[in-house]
Image: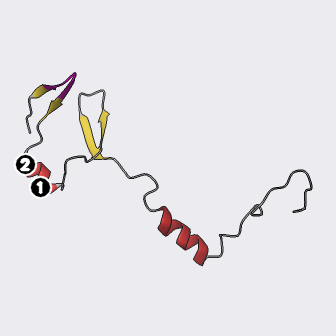
Amino acid sequence: MEATVIRVGNSLGFSVPERIINDYNIKVGTKIEMDFKQNGYVTLREKSKVREGWANAFALYAQAGEDTPLLPDFLDTETNTFL
């Protein structure tokens, strides 16, 4: 695939061909991570969403009984009533 770099305000950009947009379901606003390799290759990938999969992981912990709090719901350092 070949693309021409264009000026976009103070930045530079390039067009993504429609075939790639359709194949990878790219939308306006999709966050992309770029990785520049020393051999001149650039890898583009969709940026993972923050805490993606955490809800499922915590549900598995709960099922396994691994969700016991390590600290009480309150911390009172003056009276140390939790000790």
Q: Quadrant of residue 80?
A: bottom right
The magenta stretch is 7-12
Give the side of residue 67 with respect to residue 24, left or right: right
The answer to whether 33 appears left or right of 12 in the picture is: right
Q: Where is residue 77 in the image (x, y as percent from the top left)?
A: 87, 51
Whether 80 is among the magenta residues is no
Which label number is shown at residue 55? none
Q: Mark 1 points at which residue?
A: 22
Which residue is drawn at the image coordinates 48% and 69% (left, top)?
A: 56
Q: In which quarter of the image is residue 83?
A: bottom right
Q: Where is residue 46 in the image (x, y as percent from the top left)?
A: 29, 48
Residue plotted at (9% across, 33% down): 3
> Mark 1: which amino acid?
Asn
Q: Are marks 1 and 2 in contact (CB under 8 Å)?
A: yes
Q: Where the N terminus falls, by quadrant? A: top left
The residue beneath circle 2 is 18
**Residue 8 lies in the magenta-colored region:** yes
